[in-house]
Image: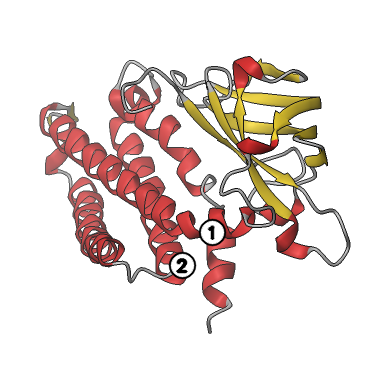
Amino acid sequence: MARGDLVAALAMSEPGAGSDVRAIRTRARREGDTYIVNGQKTFITHGHTADLICLAVKTDTGEDAGVRGFSLLVIEAGETPGFKRGRRLDKVGLKAQDTAELFFEDARVPVANLLGGVEGRGFYQLMEQLAKERINIAMQALALSEAALAETVAYVKQREVFGKRLIDFQNTRIVLAEAKTAMAVTRSFVEVCIDRLIAGTLDGETAAMAKWWATEKQCEVIDNCVQLHGGYGYMLDYPIARMWSDGRIQKIWGGSNEVMKELIARTL
């Protein structure tokens, strides 16, 4: 993977289970030294190109199993009978990145491919990494917002409306001043979170705050930048339009922002 010889994917989401990981229905039943896997995944990043797929499954379907019923299996795509890839999904943005459906029909996976070697640890393995994932999303949101702001400042300085530059209108200056302030506040918060992540002290609540805040501000800032570009902002020939369409997913993946607020509210 480090050399780029293998592409990896994480397969959690299903048609009826997205941010709520506990609702997944893909099952793995053990028979000797093999797991028999049945189920479906959707919205899987790199699903069409991945060589290795980390698959979230239920290994214990008992009513009392709860989160202890989840495990992670490493699927070797080219060596797994019963596994097939579905269609490439047509997304609003991120056109260069394949996103696909995955299907498992009596797929046979060696028991040795159980991540961690012990059943029932999958939910906890996922949760251990979610804070890091959410900070990564916050970092992406911050970088995209700052890039959009820089792109827009350059545009309004050369675009003329009613005989003067767009930057010289008070409304333009106010919108950009608000965006610059929002980005400064967001950067301060995200950098503190990065320091805590490195130190091993970042908690899930703070990571959820960072993910929610940074992506909300990203969408708000970029939408205002599109508006300042006028009709050109809606054309994919312009970087700001691609930022807008590519960035919208940030409020959804890694746990939707509504779920982030719920996680934060539970600590009140």
Q: What is the spatial separation of the Cα atoms under label 2 and label 1, in whole angstroms? A: 9 Å
Mark 1 element type: helix
Residue 179 can be seen, yes or no: yes
Q: Which mark is residue 204?
A: 2
Residue at which label 1 appears: 127
In the image, residue 104 lies at what x, y percent? 77, 27
Front in this rendered view, residue 144 or 192: 192
In the image, residue 153 lies at what x, y percent? 16, 38
Above or below, 184 against 13 in this view is below
In the image, residue 37 lies at what x, y percent? 78, 33
Above or below, 173 against 103 in this view is below
For this view, does 209 lie left or right of residue 154? right
Amino acid carrying mark 2 in the image: Gly
First in sequence: mark 2 vs mark 1: 1
Which residue: 25% across, 53% down?
A: 179
Which residue: 31% across, 22% down?
A: 3
